[in-house]
Amino acid sequence: MIRSVFAVLCFILLHIGAQAFEILPGDSLNHQEITEQAILNATVQACRSLAQTEGTSFNNPAQPFTAEGVAASCSASQSSKAFRQAITSIKLRNIRVDIRYALKPSFHFDEEEFVQGRRIITDGMVAVKADNRMGNYETAREKLGEIMHPLQDFYSHSNWVELGNTLPNSNLIKAETSIGNIADQNRATCRSCVGNDCTNNILEDIIAGQILTSGYFGLLPFVSTKPPGKCSHGGSVDQTSKIEPTGGINKDSFQSSHGHLHTQAANLAVAATSQLLEDIRLAAGDLPFLQMVGISRGSSKALCFVTDTSKSMSDDIEVVKTVTSTIINIEVGTENEPSVYILVPFNDPGFGPVIRTTDATLFKDIVNHLTTTGGGDVEEMSLSGLQLALTSAPFNSEIFLFTDAPAKDKDLKNTVIALIEQTQTVVNFMITDSVVTNRRRRRNSNLLQTRAISESDAQLYRDLAQASGGQAIVVTKAELPVAAATIVQSVSSSLVTLLQASRDPGQTDSLTFIVDETVTNPTVYITGRSLTFTLTSPTGVTQQSTDSTGSLITSSETVGNFITVRLLKQVGQWAIRMVSNNPYTLRVVGESSVDFLFDFVEPSQGPFGGFDALDTRPKAGASGTLLVTLSGSDSAAVTEVALVESTKGSEETLGVVSQGSGNFLVQVDVMPTVEFVVRVKGRVQGSATDFQRQSPTNFRASNLTLTANSDSILTAGTMTSVPFTVASTRADENITIRATNSRNLDSTFPTVLLVESGNSTNGTVTLLAPLSIPSGSDVILTIVAETPDGSDTNYIVLRFSVVNSLNDFTQPACQLLSMQSGCVENCSLSAWVASVRVTDGDSGAGVERVSLIQGTGVFNTSLEAGNENVTLVSYVASCCAPVMQLLVVDRVGNVGTCQFTARVSGSAAASLSFFLCLIIMGFGQLLLSGFMK
Ligand SMILES: *[C@@H]1O[C@H](CO)[C@@H](O)[C@H](O)[C@H]1NC(C)=O
Ligand SMILES: *[C@@H]1O[C@H](CO)[C@@H](O)[C@H](O)[C@H]1NC(C)=O
Ligand SMILES: *[C@@H]1O[C@H](CO)[C@@H](O)[C@H](O)[C@H]1NC(C)=O
Ligand SMILES: *[C@@H]1O[C@H](CO)[C@@H](O)[C@H](O)[C@H]1NC(C)=O
Ligand SMILES: *[C@@H]1O[C@H](CO)[C@@H](O)[C@H](O)[C@H]1NC(C)=O
Ligand SMILES: *[C@@H]1O[C@H](CO)[C@@H](O)[C@H](O)[C@H]1NC(C)=O
């Protein structure tokens, strides 16, 4: 009871104010809304720019922008879930800054820490751009959220708005420029407020002199670091605002000291965040930028194979080749085309490297060249390969692992489970049994070993499949092509899970699922042996699995332990009664645009409320919170959220509070002590029935707590320490620690930590990224803590990006080599020619890309002879288009633009002769086609 009261109190606390723009919805614009508006704005710009480049039309979405509306206008409605996921991930990192760095002034532009605050933004931009270059969008999103926070706070916490500015301070996203006229340390900037009126507390000479200042902030009474005469942040939490000069200047909400300027501040924060995103887009290019925000051309799904390449696998690999070709042949160019293709080979002792590409033809080619080698002994490095795939694939992916051998690296089990839970990835095992291997051995009469997978070895794969909501399919090599047909449906951009359950040991059980109007192709996948089931449709019609003449099952196929049943589409609640004494899994899927995603979050213990995304398992026996987001419809609402015990089916329904924009906070009084899945019911406005979706991933709470807080940038060549803390509500125990990273970097960590009951113990993981690692590579560190009896495990998953230089902030520069113009007053039939040299300075990384962003002329680039770092541009255009603008981007993503305008000069005769010269030089046809509009 008392715990329950606390839970409710915490839940209420989630809704109260914050130091920065608020975290949660209210009248005022908060960090979440500012961030979402800017992402939507920048995404529209990217889609418009892409359409322009491709010569297609683009229609603006209706105002105000919504994620669904923007995805639709980008012709990417099928990306809506991935788009929502990217937005949520960026938002959660943004609001984390108020929790993790609440009292660091530079993260909030407090205390006149302008230079330090800007440094956080520009260093972070280098990392984001590097991540995007390497296609590491998940890592880019996290950093992006973190640097948006100070950028947005600047407009609330400084006097930029009070100085009369109506545009963002673009120097905050440029290193090495002047941020403005920053107040001297000793200069007084504020006077005390009179009564509660703080509208005029900034000193007149500060305003008149256009001098930049920001408020001081402190939680402790009588311990103020505020120098005499400086402004305070203000508000009831800020104790410095009670010291002369009293009052504050923040514009976090309408209720703040300068709340009358809240709207201006929030709008500038949106515009500044849009500007930051635009710079990131120009550096990345439109398509990669859109992928960063989760919008892709085809499906948002990856096609991801992890395959054993040892000798006995040649039949299986033929199947991988066939499936790859099938999917690529039918899906390329459709909305089901995978957004990325991933292949991880493994055998023993080798595994990897990860092959990740967006190029379907290249991928097909690579798969077609897969060969089998090695694999002398019985076991293979399957979990190492799987770990690589889990750290390379986008969140919510589906992975297929092909093998005929047990895992040699079983000790990675908990690491793999950690990654499955954190990325909510489904892992399917395609296990081929030994029968065919034996036959092959006889036929080939070479010394292949018999590779039967024993029951206990198969159990490991079953456990991992079950944890992820996937299947462990065991078939003969001859049956594999039939089983592999399931892979084709898995890449469908709209695949949703209606129900997922498993029973081990097997037991007779009745389960229900809802097929709503939006669902097509309802399909039941079952793994298990010697089982039967009975289906009951919404109208009460039943059909036994043994009955091949019924009307509910449109097709059914069994290979090995794998049964695929396609159902008649009938809207309403279905039931399936499973009968078996053997372990089984059941997964009911369909295709629908409506789905949900969710994160475990934790109410902040800090002064400002809010919630923080969990990178770990939630606390067992304690209250918990979920942030649920619906996708696929602007008008859908959650009607019920339940945690369902995975193995028994008992469930607990939870309280739901809408947060606006399709987001819902869900309160769990007590986290279950056993494995569970998350089930969401909701209703699309105007629909007659609820929809029901389920997370495929099985989650667990833990009595161990892991926390870690470190910078997310690894500097190549420098050792990085990642301090972490383990706490436990159990008895005193020696906890086993395992730290694994996705790039096999040199690393040290304590293998055992003594954790006393009710106390915490600190440890440190060190990571050393060698200089040879390219900038923008991501490193995913998984720290696993296990109790001695193995009954309880927790983990923390941390993403880092490697950056190997933080010193090139210079944008490329243009130099006009020559301009010849025959332009006269009457522009038609006259032309101009320019030649431009683009360089990146002496210490720059070199020019990577030059493109024409304004102008309709003929544009060509070439490298300067003998210098790959210099790009030469030649341009010829009609005088009716006298302006040309170039976008120049260097190899670390510094973005510049250069503009040139044709001069009007010369006589009509000179112009005509110039034009004739151009025709003689071979530009004639291009020019004429441009002129004769
Ligand atoms: C949208 O982005 C553009 C480009 O960065 C910016 O100029 C504009 O102010 C933004 N719109 C809003 C409403 O902030
Ligand atoms: C956590 O501790 C409680 C009480 O001791 C116990 O009932 C529960 O099973 C434990 N949970 C896990 C995941 O070990
Ligand atoms: C932890 O390990 C140390 C060293 O092996 C041992 O002395 C100690 O008794 C262990 N503590 C507990 C609580 O198991
Ligand atoms: C917690 O651990 C620290 C470090 O080992 C120790 O100094 C402290 O006394 C412990 N506290 C309790 C309550 O056991
Ligand atoms: C453990 O780390 C935390 C956070 O870094 C620190 O506050 C605490 O003092 C450390 N405890 C010990 C016993 O070193
Ligand atoms: C181009 O720039 C790179 C990076 O600064 C440098 O290593 C290389 O030597 C330069 N090439 C030439 C030809 O100057």
Image (cartoon, rainbow, N blue to C red):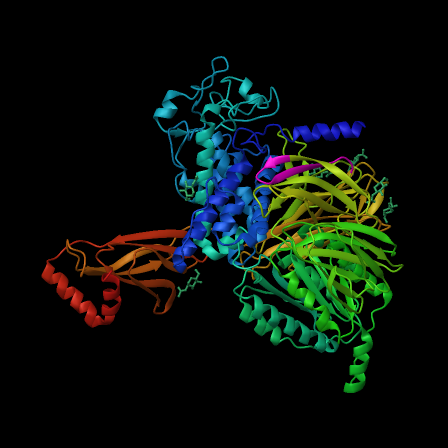
Residue 336, position as x, y percentages in the image: 58, 61
Residue 300, position as x, y percentages in the image: 58, 56
Q: Is residue 662 magenta?
A: yes
Residue 134 falls left or right of residue 497: left
Residue appearing at x 87%, y 54% in the figure: 508
Residue furthest to the top: 195
Total numbered labels: 0
Q: Nearer the viewer, residue 233 or 230?
A: 233
* Image quarter of residue 841: bottom left
* Image quarter of residue 727: top right
Residue 419, position as x, y percentages in the image: 70, 54
Rendered view: 148 above or below 74: above
Residue 884 falls left or right of residue 552: left
Quadrant in which the N terminus appears: top right
**Res. 71 visible in picture:** yes
Quadrant in which the C terminus appears: bottom left
Secondary structure mainly formed by the magenta segment: strand
Q: Nearer the viewer, residue 422 or 74?
A: 74
> From which residue to which does the magenta span run?
658-670
* Image quarter of residue 160: top left
Residue 449 falls left or right of residue 684: right
Rendered view: 76 above or below 27: below
Q: Nearer the viewer, residue 27 or 18?
A: 27
Q: Is residue 229 magenta?
A: no
**Res. 749 visible in picture:** no
Residue 859, position as x, y percentages in the image: 31, 63
